Structures are given as C-alpha cells and as structure tokens.
Image (tube, rainbow, N blue to C red):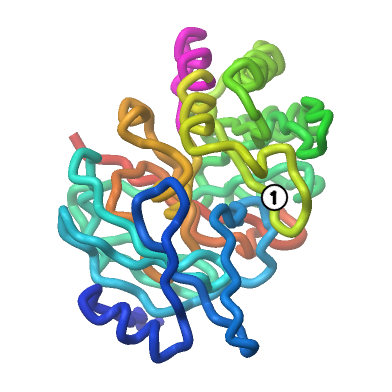
Amino acid sequence: MRKKHIVLLCSTCFLLLSTAGCSLQSSPGTGSMEVTEVPDSSKLQSDPYPPDYAQGQNTKEKSTLLLTEPEQNESFCFVDAWGEWFETMIDPNLKQHTYDWNCLERNGDEITYEKDPRYVIKKGIDVSHHQGKIDWEKVRADGYEFAFIRIAYRGYGEEGSLNPDREYETNLTNAKAAGMQTGVYVFSQAVSELEAIEEAQFVLHHLKNYSIDLPIVYDPEQIRDQKARTDHVTREQFTKNAVAFCKEVKAAGYQPMIYSNMYWEAFLLDFKQLQEYSVWYADYEIIPQTPYAFEFLQYSESGCVDGIEGPVDLNLWFIHRE
C-alpha cells in the first residue's frame, strides 16, 4: 500500500490549528503550552492530565496531520489519541532516535520498517487476559517473534490492590514453547515510591519460576473518564516512582524498561532522570511523533493476528546492528 505522508511544518502549526478551531493554553507546571480543541459552544475544554491510551481504552485509532521531525531547541506540536493538540519544547539533553521514517510502510493494520541497513526489525505483540486463550503456535507462524505479557496490575480504585494477570502463567509458558521471545509488564497505579517498589517486588515474585528474554516494563497509566487514584499524582512523583521501580528490577538482575507515549514524555515523566532505561513507546499516528530515543514501538491497538480472537496491540522492535 502506498505510504501516507501528511506533513505539517511546525512554523505553520498554530495557523492551521487556529483555523481548525483550536486554542492554546498554558499547561500547569510544565512551562509549555497546551493546544486544546474548542467545542461548538466555544467554551474551552482543558484537561492538564489526559489519560494514557495504551491499554485499549481508546476504541478508535485516529490518523491526523503529522509534523516534520523537529530540530533541537525548538517547539513542536503533537496530537494525542483523542485528537487534542499540544505544544512542547525539544529537550536537547535527551537522546534522540535516529530512525529514518522514509523506511516506514503501512500495509493495512501493520507497519513495516525496511531498507535501513542499521537495524534489524522484529514484529511482536503485547497481551493480557483480555485476549483470552491464545494459540501461540499460530501467532509465531504468523510472523510474530516476541511478546510482552502482562504479569500484574494494580487496581485504579482507592484501595489499589495488586493482582497477577490470570493468564500470565499460561501465556509465558506457551509463548516460550512456541519460540517467542518474551518480556513482561505491570500496569501501574502507584502513587508513591513505596508502591512502585511493591509493584516491582510483586512482579519479581511471580516471575521467579520463569525465564524471560526481554525487559520487565513499568507501565504507569492514567484512567480515562473515571476517577482514579493517580489523578493527582505530579510529574515529579511519577518520575520518582519510575526510578524506584527500575532500580528494584535492575538490582534483581533484570533489565527494566519504561512504557511511555508523547504526552508522558512531554508532561508526566522527567526523562532526564530516566535516560539509563530503554523506552517502549506507544503512538498510533501514521508516523511516530516523538523525537526521543526508543527501542520498541507500539503502533496499533487493533491488530489482527492469527491465533488471537479480537484485536491485539502490535509492536516493532528496533535492534541496532553491531
């Protein structure tokens, strides 16, 4: 399928947004500007902490205008999963990716990254009990080579109880038997460093009888349209939580990794304190919007994979050639 490139230069971003009925508003505590859509009533709707969209909470993928990759020391605009626009500054102190998006091709639900001799690319998925019983042999035969499996989650209610994913044992065992490389993630609702450490220890306890090839991923989430225990957690605290989790995992001999998207990178995590950890980046736009380095890309939440009933998240793993 022909690759779609819809490019919007940052220098014209605000002009286009203003003609589309958008307004700019300062984002609390970030030192940057927020772009929010003005509804028909012309009354500005502002949400300084829109929730994450990676766990299937967003039911429709959106393809919207895209930006050229920004240079250092300049601002750029990005769009979240609900079509809200934001502006942020490029942090020149953070490592940037070197991917060539001219090598990116979209074919139906899938994207491929080819003809870049610097990288080997593997296709993968991430799953939880929401995918039901999985035929991992069929998944592997369909060309998928790795999987991140949810091993645990914390409830987003006031109690915030920690629970193992009820399919994690079956998924880890059967994915491994099918020849898949595996990693695990925890859906975090930690509101403190102590809770983040508790989540790490919970994961390590439930992983002790299994071997994995890929990182243990810290997946902090905000909840859309419902009250959640993380609603008022600050960027500073989210960052402390991530550091605490990753240190605990690393001390146990595993590789930690952080799940993020562009909004979290801009406003909710201070990646200057997290640069030693790899990133699993989620973005459902035609071309990933982040300028920053990442190793894994989650590019769809509605993929169709043989062996799985219903939609599943699709991922690419960018492996740098030595």
Q: Where is 291 relative to 128, above or below? A: below
Residue 115 visible:
no
Is 254 part of what is drawn in magenta? yes
The stretch in magenta equals 245-257
- Closer to the camera in the image, 258 or 161: 161
Q: Amino acid at mark 1?
A: Ile
Q: Where is 112 relative to 222, above or below? A: below
Q: Label 1: which residue?
A: 223
User: x and y percent of residue 53 in the render?
Assistant: 61, 56
Total tally of numbered discs in the picture: 1
Q: Quarter of the image for the C terminus: give it.
A: top left
Residue 41 visible:
yes
Q: Residue at x 50, y 72 (%)?
A: 36
Is 253 part of what is drawn in magenta? yes
Q: Residue at x 64, y 88 (%)?
A: 41
Q: Is residue 228 left or right of residue 84?
A: right
User: x and y percent of residue 33 in the render?
Assistant: 38, 62
Q: Quarter of the image for the N terminus: give it.
A: bottom left
Q: Residue at x 43, y 46 (%)?
A: 29
- Label 1: state its secondary structure: loop
Q: Where is 237 relative to 68, above or below? A: above
User: x and y percent of residue 309 in the render?
Assistant: 77, 59
Q: Badge 1: how crowded within 10 Å, few (<14), some, or many (20+)?
A: some
- Closer to the camera in the image, 148 or 163: 163
- Closer to the camera in the image, 205 or 228: 228
Q: Is residue 288 left or right of residue 248?
A: left
Q: Is residue 130 left or right of residue 144?
A: right
User: x and y percent of residue 81 in the render?
Assistant: 55, 66
